[in-house]
Image (tube, grey):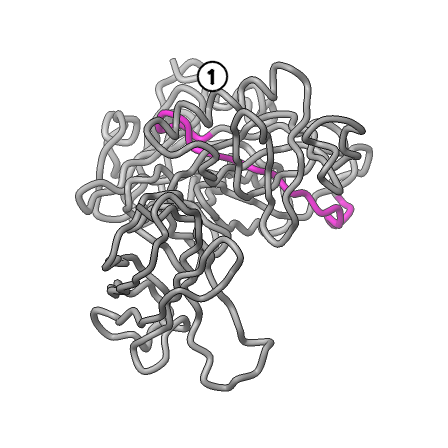
Amino acid sequence: MYNLFAFRFIVISLLVSGATPSCAKQDANALWQGPSASSSPADTSYLFDNNWIRLENGRAGWQAAPGSATKIRVALFGETVLNDLNNDGNDDAVIFLTYQGGGSGTFFYLAAALQENGKYRGTNTIWLGDRIGPPAARVQNGLVIVEYLDRNQNEPMTVAPSLLQTRYFILVDSLLQEIKLAVDDAVYQGWLTIGHEVYSFQPCEKSALWLLGKPAALDASIAAYRKTMPGFPPYTPVFAILSGTTTIPPEEGFGAEYEQAFSVSQIVHIWPKGNCRSNWIRLDSPLPGANISSPVTIKGKARGIWFFEGDFPVILLDSQDNKIAESYATAHGEWMSEDFVEFEGVIPYSGALSGQRGFLLLKKDNPTGMEQFDDALRIPITFE
């Protein structure tokens, strides 16, 4: 017996009638089969509660009970967002699904389809709401951010949704999980640095903050950093996603040198290949914090807007932002595209720099010279 969605969809009494769901012209066993891989997210299976539903051309449907005029329908909704969710270099798919059970409700779900060897395999689904405003998703460094309009708790369904909701999700062991935030907490992405004299977190577009927090959250952040960075030089930054709040720094000790502190509530994710511009440019080599030697080979992917005439500047800086060397990275393929394009560049340098820290700067080529169109990716490195 399939009691699918019974706890949410009480209004659909036929669904829990005791009969196996079936669908005219569609085999029930095929509809409810286990996870299947397909060349498209529109033709794979997704887990609703304890049951897998396989889509065909983005849809699935079956009778609520044998002989019933009521039909259950599941369908893809809106645009599919492609981005890497599990740090394997493949673009996975983030999708929305609607579930309609013959009543007035339209239930929205979030799901993902993970790509491997050109095939997509669906994940679990997470319920978003009933008759909400059209949801939208974006992904950065493995973090899925979903926004939609909903109603206040006591408002009836006849009221148009007007309350903005923002929810966060990540992939853990091939399952989508929601990040639950404490009151007043926010999610930040940036550079985490741990060492004997430094516990710091530098959110994107902000100055470095001294890292504070409850012992469990702080200890978890330190442990995750050390697990991710074995063999790297001390104090090497790693890209991380944390939740928490900004606060005042301690009055004594190393933290007193910072203007503000960050009280961490939980470490959401560590993404060693991540960066603050990952929706525009992704660097495969060198990785953030890596030891480099001359000449440095630079490889990655960038959207076409990052190039001009197929190139963009790459610059090596010392720890004081003094320029050491400059070169160009070149697109491999057609660069006049909104998609990601592979690039490669080589930048030689000279000087007594062994053991010193510095930065690799990958600048968006801006032939206009207008500051509002400037952009750059800044990656920490160490000179061998």
Q: Residue furthest left?
A: 117
Q: Quadrant of residue 258?
A: top right
Q: Give the residue displayed 33% in from the left and 59% down from the top.
A: 351
Q: Quadrant of residue 219?
A: top right
Asked if one can make out residue 24 in the rendered structure from this viewpoint, the answer is no
Coordinates of residue 211 in the picture (x, y in percent):
64, 30
Q: Which residues are magenta?
A: 158-176
Q: Residue furthest front?
A: 352
- Residue 161 is one of the magenta-drawn residues: yes
Residue in front for this viewpoint, 40 or 291: 291
Residue at 37%, 32% (x, y): give it: 123
Task: Check the image and report above or below for 373 versus 224.
Answer: below
Residue 327: % across, % down:
32, 71
**Residue under the point 54% across and 40% down:** 108
Residue bearing the label numbered 1: 17
Between 350 and 377, the one nearer to me in the picture:
350
- Location of residue 33 (image quadrant): top left
Q: Is residue 352 magenta?
A: no
Residue at the limit of the structure toward the bottom, as seen here: 368
Looking at the image, which is closer to me, 51 or 170?
Answer: 170
Residue 281 sits above or below residue 269 on the image: below
Q: Is residue 59 above or below residue 372?
A: above
